[in-house]
Image: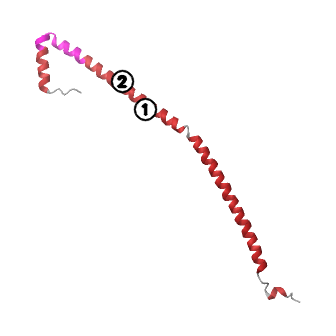
């Protein structure tokens, strides 16, 4: 915070000793230390509250962003269902063609001689 070195502290101590006097200096130092401690504690408390509020705001923004996810999920589900039905229809068409092609292929095959003549 402040860049106060040892020489500055000695100068402040000497001036305060001359101004306040040796009888009251320990009491004044205690009071000043008490208020500095209170001030530091208050500043730390305010920093912690700000940190908590910022974290809470970040969480609210994340929840707000994720509230749009069900719409995206619904679109993905609809697309998935559409693709599944298209794949199913294509598979059915392929199966139908395969059966038709197999039947046509069987009809075009020559009948073996053993099957042409019935045994007596």
Q: Which residues are magenta?
A: 17-33
Q: Is residue 5 above or below residue 62?
A: above
The quadrant of the rendering that contains the C terminus is: bottom right
Q: Nearer the viewer, residue 91 or 59?
A: 91
The one of 23 and 74 positioned closer to us in this rendering: 74
For the residues labelled 2 and 1, the Cα–Cα distance comes to: 14 Å
Question: What is the quadrant of residue 95 in the picture?
Answer: bottom right
> Residue 16's quadrant in the figure?
top left
Give residue 118's quadrant in the image: bottom right
Residue name at image x 14 percent, y 19 percent: 12
Q: Between residues 78 and 113, which one lies in front from this camera angle?
A: 78
Q: What residue sits 15% from the left and 27% below the top?
A: 5
User: What is the secondary structure assignment of the residue under circle 1?
Assistant: helix
Residue 46 circle label? 2
Residue at the far right: name it: 120
| Secondary structure mostly taken by the magenta-highlighted segment of the chain | helix
Position of the N terminus, as image quadrant, is: top left
Q: Identify the residue at horizontal 74%, vertical 66% (top origin).
A: 96
Q: Earlier in the sequence, mark 2 or mark 1?
A: 2
Residue to which mark 1 is pinned: 55
């Amino acid at each position: 915070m402040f860049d106060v070195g040892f020489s500055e502290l000695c100068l402040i101590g000497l001036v305060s000793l001359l101004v306040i006097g040796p009888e009251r200096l320990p009491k004044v130092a205690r009071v000043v230390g008490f208020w500095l401690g209170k001030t530091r504690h208050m500043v730390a408390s305010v920093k912690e509250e700000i940190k908590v509020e910022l974290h809470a705001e970040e969480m609210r923004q994340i929840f707000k962003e994720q509230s749009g996810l069900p719409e995206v999920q619904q679109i993905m589900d609809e697309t998935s269902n559409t693709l599944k039905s298209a794949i199913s229809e294509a598979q059915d068409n392929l199966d139908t063609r395969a059966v038709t092609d197999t039947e046509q292929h069987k009809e075009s095959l020559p009948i073996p001689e053993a099957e042409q003549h019935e045994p007596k």
